[in-house]
Image: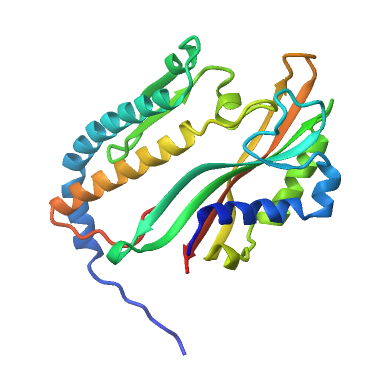
Amino acid sequence: MPTTLTLRGFDELQAELERLTPELTREAIALQQSIANETAAAVRAAYPSATGALRASVQVERLSSTSPARTFTQITVTAPYAEHVEFGTAHTTPTPAFVPQTRIGRERFTDAVIARVRAAGLVVGGDLR
Amino acid sequence: MADTGLVDAAVMEVLANDAALAALCPDGVYWGVRPGGSPAPGAFVIVALFDHREQPALAGETLYERTNYLVKAVVFATSKTPARQAAARIHALLHGVILDLAAAGYEAMDLRRIDRVAYPEIDLVNKATWHHHGGQYELMSYPL
């Protein structure tokens, strides 16, 4: 016996999302940039400093996107020994900095976008992490 | 009484009690760093707390905790193969395993690798190579 599942309301939902997207994307770009800069500052602060080169190598870069509804920002650490500091050497302890701070940054951005979407009158549910 | 330090110890114990891993890394399992300042060439396992977050519940209770451990084999060798083999054993011991955390006052929900770690390190003293292979393992648990 065939089973049929009918879902209604997608056209209305899509129309709502399209209406929301340009404004939300503009807000999200600014939010993401701001949180990325704060995250980079937190990574720098968590690193040890001998010459300052490691801290100075933490970079924030906004990446291009082919979709107007997507925004990407990348945090990189260019010092060649960053891995040795983060994960440790045979003689030194690991220094968790980039991994936990970028996790916190991603969660802060998700929470901020959810707050904006809710402020726009939409309901956000489920576990988004 | 929940004690997160005992949870750390339970993870260490799984690794320290395994004969196959001990054969690959005979110099032991250590928390954070191998003691002794400048360790002699050898093969050992490092476990370190990398990230931790708690999901709060009502009345000051904790719903669950997510703990991210760095677990890696550190092997002094000309080839990365022994370190890679030790990392594979670590993975077999931890990934997808439900640990018994009763002694720590916790119940484990999940343990899995969320990222790999693999890099060489040139020893500053003798210019030979240490190979670091392992991963970040996330343990989800809740206090009893």
The image quadrant that residue B120 belongs to is: top right
Q: Give coordinates of residue A113: x percent, y percent.
A: 25, 45
- Position of residue A92 in the picture relative to residue B4 (left or right): right
The image quadrant that residue A88 belongs to is: top right
Residue at 19% x, 40% y: name it.
A22
Q: Give coordinates of residue A47: x percent, y percent.
A: 47, 24
Residues B102 and A39: in front is B102
> Can residue B111 be seen from the camera position used here?
yes
- Position of residue A99 in the picture relative to residue A37 (left or right): right
Against A5, is A87 above or below? above
The image quadrant that residue B123 belongs to is: top right
Residue at 70% x, 32% y: name it.
B35
Q: Give coordinates of residue B1: x percent, y percent.
A: 48, 64
Q: Give coordinates of residue A51: x percent, y percent.
A: 49, 9
Against B41, is B94 above or below? below
- Position of residue B37 in the picture relative to residue A74 (left or right): right
> Can residue A63 be seen from the camera position used here?
no
Residues B96 and A69: in front is B96
In the rendered view, how is the structure colored?
rainbow
Residue at 57% x, 56% y: name it.
B7
Against A64, is B22 above or below? below
Residues A100 and B9: in front is B9
Residues A127 and B27: in front is B27
